[in-house]
């Protein structure tokens, strides 16, 4: 087990090799050095910046690729110069911030040493009055891993405590005097334990809960509409129909989850300012942006594959659902009345998916009733949201 650091800062003798000798001088606290990405900040400043740029203009990917060929430090400096980021809304690790603030109040100097670009990190540090100094990548040197360890060892020869999270931070912990592990992976935690230093451990919450929340698994209940045609057509006893409906349900659910994650990536700046949406995994930083993008890709591919197994008509319905949903996320949700019409259409499309999956006879009455019912519900929901918004402004 990793031993916890005591509440008082670790003190080191300044200037004498033996703190108990007659020439003892006043002891001073060694500095507390914090990593930034995934430590003080819930996220990666470079990734946040790149997503911000691509959100504005996806074609900038070409320019980013050219910068990357000139080195990571160069890429970070160029990205920091053009990225439009609301630093006040970036999610931070409140536990780590409170820990650092307490150390500062106890007399320990607090330094941020990050592989992110130093200029971008300085703009973020306005939020942290307890930070005394910022060291980062400068466009030439990428301050990460062994490079960071060498610099900190030279700058603080009497020792320093270090807070980090990744395998790259193992280089730094090996030359530090105290370790603070911030939500590391199990492999990093095991490797850090072998170093044998006193350590404080900020544990990571259960990953599966974060992923389930990002995928909106609770929303899969809406896709239960694909089973309605099976029941209404009197095919409850047909095992083949149930198998087809289950494939359609699973494919539609995974695809819908992928679109939820993509929507969260697109709406990230807005969600972080929202009272409740700011607690979503991506907006809160509980899920890294790259993990979110990967999760969306895997869920989308799996959903389309299951749709193809259910048959080409089902796949066509799922593709239509995906395209309409992404169009809604990108622009249609900001068009009055068209937004609620789109939502009603998506609910009806779930019924259509069920109809083609089990080869049930299409019912114009059922589809018409569905469209009017879900349009009414969408209008009611939008009215509630408008009233709530007006109430908050008063």
Image: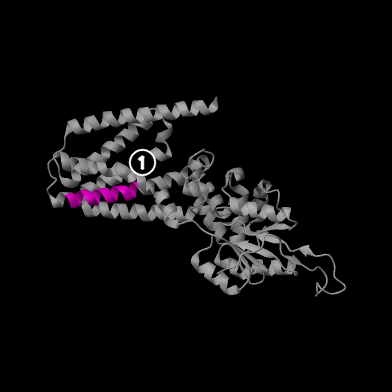
Residue at which label 1 appears: 325
> Residue 242 at x, y = what percent?
18, 50
Using residue 163 as the reference point, say whether residue 153 is left or right of it. right
Quick check: is 247 in the magenta stretch?
A: yes
Image location of residue 55, percent across then percent down? 50, 45
- Tell me where residue 110 appears, x and y as whole percent: 71, 57
Residue 103 shown left or right of residue 287 in the figure: right
Residue 70 visible in the snapshot: no
- The residue nearer to you, when weighing 261 against 17, is 17
- x 80%, y 65%: residue: 27
Instruction: Name the quadrant of the N terminus.
Output: bottom right
Above/below status of 256 relative to 172: above
**Predominant secondary structure in magenta?**
helix
Q: Nearer the viewer, residue 68 or 179?
A: 179
Give residue 41's position: percent from left, percent from top: 59, 53
Identify which residue is drawn at 40% across, 45% down: 260
Q: Is residue 174 above or below residue 292?
A: below
User: What is the magenta range?
Assistant: 242-256
Question: In the rendered structure, does residue 274 fall within the stretch colored magenta?
Answer: no
Tell me if 173 is positioned left or right of 57 in this view.
Answer: right
Where is 167 relative to 50, above or below? Answer: below
The chosen color scheme is one colour
Q: In which quadrant of the rendered view does residue 354 lie?
A: top left
Task: Report whether residue 109 is seen.
Answer: yes
């Amino acid at each position: 087990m990793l031993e916890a650091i005591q509440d008082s800062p670790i003190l080191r003798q300044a200037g004498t090799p033996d703190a108990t000798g007659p020439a003892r001088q006043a002891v001073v606290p060694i500095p507390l050095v914090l990593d930034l990405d995934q430590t003080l900040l819930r996220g990666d400043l470079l990734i946040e910046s790149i997503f911000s740029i691509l959100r504005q203009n996806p074609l900038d990917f070409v320019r980013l690729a050219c910068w990357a060929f000139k080195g990571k430090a160069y890429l970070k400096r160029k990205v920091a110069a053009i990225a439009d980021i609301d630093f006040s809304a970036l999610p931070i690790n409140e536990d780590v911030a409170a820990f650092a603030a307490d150390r500062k109040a106890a007399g320990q100097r607090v330094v941020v040493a990050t592989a992110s670009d130093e200029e971008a990190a300085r703009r973020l540090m306005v939020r942290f009055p307890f930070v005394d100094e910022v060291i980062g990548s400068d466009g030439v040197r990428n301050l990460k891993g062994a490079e960071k360890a060498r610099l900190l060892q030279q700058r603080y020869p009497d020792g320093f405590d270090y807070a980090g999270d990744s395998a790259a931070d193992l280089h730094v912990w090996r030359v530090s005097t105290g370790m603070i592990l911030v939500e590391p992976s199990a492999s990093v935690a095991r490797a850090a334990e072998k170093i044998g230093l006193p350590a404080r451990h900020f544990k990571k919450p259960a990953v599966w809960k974060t992923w389930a929340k990002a995928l909106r698994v609770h929303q899969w209940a809406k896709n239960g509409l694909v089973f309605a045609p099976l029941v209404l057509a009197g095919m409850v006893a047909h095992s083949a129909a149930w198998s087809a409906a289950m494939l359609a349900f699973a494919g539609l659910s995974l695809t819908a989850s992928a679109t939820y994650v993509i929507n969260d990536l697109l709406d990230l700046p807005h969600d972080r300012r929202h009272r409740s949406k700011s607690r979503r995994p991506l907006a809160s930083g509980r899920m890294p942006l790259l993990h979110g993008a990967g999760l969306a890709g895997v869920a989308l591919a799996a959903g389309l594959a299951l749709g193809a197994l259910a048959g080409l008509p089902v796949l066509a319905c799922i593709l239509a659902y995906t395209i309409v949903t992404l169009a809604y996320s990108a622009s249609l949700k900001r068009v009055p009345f068209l937004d609620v019409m789109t939502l009603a259409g998506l609910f009806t499309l779930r019924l259509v998916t069920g109809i083609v999956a089990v080869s049930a006879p299409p019912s114009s009455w059922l589809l018409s009733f569905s469209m009017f019912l879900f349009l009414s519900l969408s209008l009611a929901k939008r009215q509630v949201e408008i009233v709530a918004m007006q109430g908050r402004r008063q």
